[in-house]
Image (tube, helix red, strand yellow):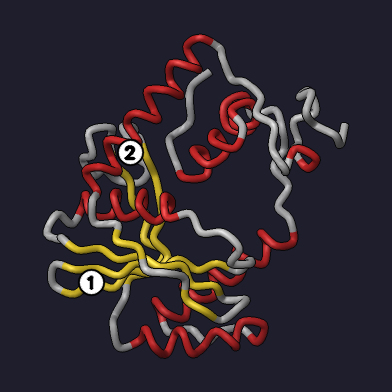
Amino acid sequence: MKLPTYSYSFLNCYDTCPKQAFHRYVLKDIKFVPTEAITWGNTVHEALDKRVGKGTPLPPECAKFEPYALALDALKPTTETKVAIQRDGTPVSYYDDSVWFRGKADVVVEMNDTALFLDWKTGRSDYEDPYELELHAMAFQAARPHLRKITARYVWLKENKLGRPYDVSNVGETLECLQEKADEIEMAHKRGEWPTKQGPLCGWCPVKSCGFNRAK
């Protein structure tokens, strides 16, 4: 069994519980069923991509997000940009056979050697994970090496507020950390060691063979 191409989703799942990551992304013996919240999030991302990137009017259920689109119109951003790199950080096409990490940038505004990343979120702003923003900035900058300063923020649409600004310019350090994490995962895979990790979401985990799963 091969390891999947690295992504924030896979890495985040691995940090949550290696055993769940193994079943979901490597063995693939559990079916992913999108929740209502995930479906809504996909709908919003698609609508904003068409509005901000192409001028298509927002559907009625997303009309309340129009102020964000208006604010971005004059900045000529790129939206839903697919980014990918090889292990050494070299940029590569998204579906190339040599791809090692894939990501996607919701909104990017470039100004000379600086860039602003915005990541749409439709849930609650209880927790922000700048690692997601760092990874996508790393892969984006690989294809645009002239960028020196990159700032990233979450946009919490449900609460109509911006998250805190993060400086994600240190893409070299981000790549090194990702390479180290990949070494750890690849060694675990070689040894067949995908340990369970107990957490607050165990009751909703689809891996029924885990001893921590209270929903069995």
Q: Residue at x 22, y 33 (%)?
A: 88
Quarter of the image for residue 86 reads top left
Mark 1 = which residue? 110
Q: Considering only order in the chain, which callout, 1 or 2, is on the residue closer to the N terminus?
A: 2
Amino acid beneath label 1: Glu
The quarter of the displayed image where residue 133 is located? bottom left
Badge 2 crowding class, 10 Å Cα cut-off, few under 14, some 14 to 19, many 20 or more, is few
The disc placed on residue 96 is 2
Residue 99 vs 128, above or below: the answer is above
User: Which residue shows up at 28% across the image and 32% down it?
Assistant: 87
- Is 172 placed above or below 105 here? above
Q: Which residue is outermost to the right?
A: 216
Residue in the image at 48% along x and 83% along y: 56
Amino acid, disc 2: Asp
Left or right: 14 as drawn, with respect to 215: left
Q: From the top left corner, tell me how far across and down residue 107 is, in percent.
A: 38, 69
